[in-house]
Structures are given as C-alpha cells and as structure tokens.
Image (cartoon, rainbow, N blue to C red):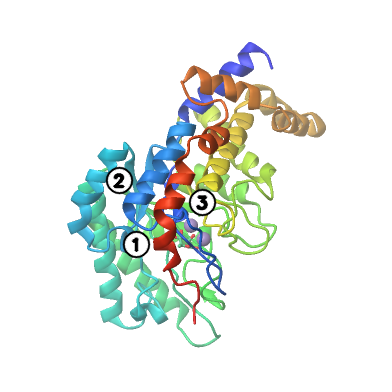
Amino acid sequence: MNDKAVEVVWKALDRLAIELPSWGFANTGTRFGKFIQPAAATSIQEKFSDAAQVHAVTGACPTLALHVQWDLPNGLKDVPEVERLAKQFSIRPGSINPNIFQNQEYKYGSVGNPDPAIRRMAIRHILDCVAISEALGAPDISPWFADGSNYPGTQNIRKRIGYFEEGLREIHAALKPGQRLLLEYKPFEPAFYHTDIADWGMALLLARAAGPQALVLVDTGHHYQAQNIEQIVAWLLHQNMMGGFHFNDRRYADDDLTLGSIDPYQIFRIFHEIRMFEWETQTTADIAYMVDQSHNLKGKIEAMIQTVCTAQELYARAALVDHGSLARLQQECSLVDAEETLRGAFWQDVRPAIQEWRKSRRLPADPMQAFRTSGYLERITRERSEKNRNTTASYA
Ligand code: RM4
Ligand code: MN
Ligand code: MN
C-alpha cells in the first residue's frame, strides 16, 4: 500500500468512533436457555469496566450505550451513579435505550397498545429516558418497539399507526435542541404476524410525523433475507434521515452475531455508501455507529474486540475507494471497471496500515493479543464466577 493510501486509512480510523452496548457484556441467551459465562458482567459497574478494556486496546470506543431498565433501574435517580462510573472508567454514557418490551403490561404492545393507560405508561417511560439523556449529556434516545400482533385480524393496524404518531409527537415535543430520537425498525420477533415499525419506510414516516429531531436507526440484523441494506442507507442519507446503526451480523434471523462474521462485503458496501455520500456532499454524516450484538458463546469482551476491529478494517477499506474515478466510471456506465474499483478497495489488506496507525496512537498493535495478555479476563473470571453461578439459565 502506498503512502497516500496509508494516510487515507489513518484519517478514516481517526474519525471512526464505535459505541459499545452495555447489554453485550452481560449474559444473554436464546429462546431456549442462557449459557452462563463466568466472566460476564453482572452490574453496571462491571459493564463500564469491560467497555473500558475494549476502549483501552482499540482506542475506538469512547461511549457505552445504556439500557435504562437494566442499567438505571431507578431511572433519573441513578444518573449520579452512572456519572460517577463514567468518570471512574473514562467512558462516556452513550445512547439511552428505553425498555418498552419487558413489563407484563406490554403483552399487547406499548405505544401501540389499544389500552390508553398502557400507552401512557410507555410514553412516560420514554419521557423519563429523554430526561436521563439530558441529565447525562448523552443526546441520542433510541427506542426499539416490540409492538405488533401475532395473528391476522387481532389488531387494527391503522389505529396503531395513529397511536404511534401521537405518542412519538408527544415525545419529540420534550426533546431539547441537540437531542435526537432514533427509531429502530424490525420486521419480526417477538411479534410474528405484524410489527408496528417493521421496516425503514415505516420508521421514516413515523420519524417525519414525530418531528425534525427524529431519525431512523438501522440495525443490520433487522431485515428480510436478501434485502439490499446499503440501498436503504443510501435512501436515508439522501433524505437526511440516517441517524445511527446497530451493528451485528446474521445468517437467518436477528442473530446478533459479531460484525462481518457472515458477510463482510455487506458491511463494506454500507460504509461505501456513507463515504461516497460524504465525498459527494463534502459533509460529514452525523451517524451514531453502535454495536448491538449479544452472542452467547463467544467470550463477551473478545467478541466485542473482534467486532470493533472488523468495523475498523471494513471502514478503512471503504475509505480506499477512489471516489473520483468511481463517479466517472459510473457516469460512463463502465460496469466492469466501476465494480472492480469497489472490489479493488474491498480486497486490500489494510491490516498492516491499521497496525501502524495503532502504534502511532500508542495503542497495542494487536488488540486481541493485548487483551489476552492483560490478565483482565482471569481477574474478572475469579471475581464474578460465583455471582454468575447463581444466575438463572432456564426460562422454565
Ligand atoms: C432488539 C433490538 C434492540 C435491542 C433489543 C434488546 O432486537 O435490536 O435494539 O435493544 O433487541
Ligand atoms: Mn438493535
Ligand atoms: Mn435486534
């Protein structure tokens, strides 16, 4: 790789910040049971501590996404504790994730529930999240709605659209300047017949109905098979509606696997759309790059390091696309040469350039190796295994 290419890679890496999910460090499971890891985080303090380890070896993860019900069970009252941990571990609180899917009340939905009292409960919770976001100076609130129905004819789909428009408008009215409401879509699970916000179009229309500070969040695992995700990203960029990502990979459903493990070219193509947009418009897209993975067999921290390094590699490769010549080749409809321009960047081995970047930033050249030799995993395994042994693994 020539010096110019190395410079492009370095510049790209300097810009890429990736947010880690607090829940990605805790024990998670499948629909059939949990497989408990002795080193999994059992408290918000341990989640901050683990995130700090990932940041220490990668230098790319300054923020931690928080799930309010799991991480701030007492809501606003827990803000000082979160601030204390943020300071202690030098990790800032990231996006604030409401939980409108776990309480018994939400059996038939939250903001789309036919019962006005339950809709009120859900809206109130999200309004609390807006206040928490403000108090923490963490401007993004990213709700994911499990709302939907499981059998045809059992719910009035249009009425529920109305409930969402109304509820989201009220939530948007509480936003302060700079705060953003990122609406995540998902076509299935837990609802299997209809999901109230099933795809990017529904998320976009609801965001528009809510107000200008509402944008769309793309979780890479939340699509139908074979859907062209980079085209969705291109549309959202074109509409100025691209708010953020939840990165993970999937083979079948919402598998939450580590990024790029199944299809790295897909993630590369997404990054390419963003870089091409930025090159054409000479702007920087204000996108929150967040990880949402919770695979239960790989070690939590190692899985996170793997995802962050993969994101860096694929982002660096996307940065290597020669936008000027690609634009010309597209204009000329030189199909093979245009495609080869893209593929040529994809097949570059950027790892040596990334290693040099890491060294120049006083980071370990090999983050995984650095983590493995740090002794951290052995220490937390000793400290946490007793607590984790007492965790329920069964859903029965
Ligand atoms: C959903 C979605 C949300 C995440 C929950 C736990 O599938 O991806 O972002 O918060 O899972
Ligand atoms: Mn998600
Ligand atoms: Mn998901």
Q: Earlier in the sequence, mark 3 or mark 1?
A: 1
* Amino acid type for the residue under numbered disc 3: Lys
* Nearer mark to the viewer, of 3 and 1: 3
What residue is rendered at 35% in x and 46% in y? 48
Circle 1 — which element? helix
Residue 70's disc number: 1
Residue 295 location in percent, x, y?
Answer: 56, 57
From where the camera sits, is residue 97 visible? yes
Q: Quadrant of residue 288?
A: top left
Q: Earlier in the sequence, mark 3 or mark 2?
A: 2
Q: Which residue is mark 2?
A: 139
Q: Mark 2, residues whose alpha carbon is within 10 Å: few (<14), some, or many (≥20)? A: many
Circle 3 — which element? helix
Q: Which residue is mark 3?
A: 300
Q: Quadrant of residue 276?
A: top right
What residue is rendered at 51% in x and 63% in y? 36
Horizontal side, residue 382 vs residue 277: left or right:
left
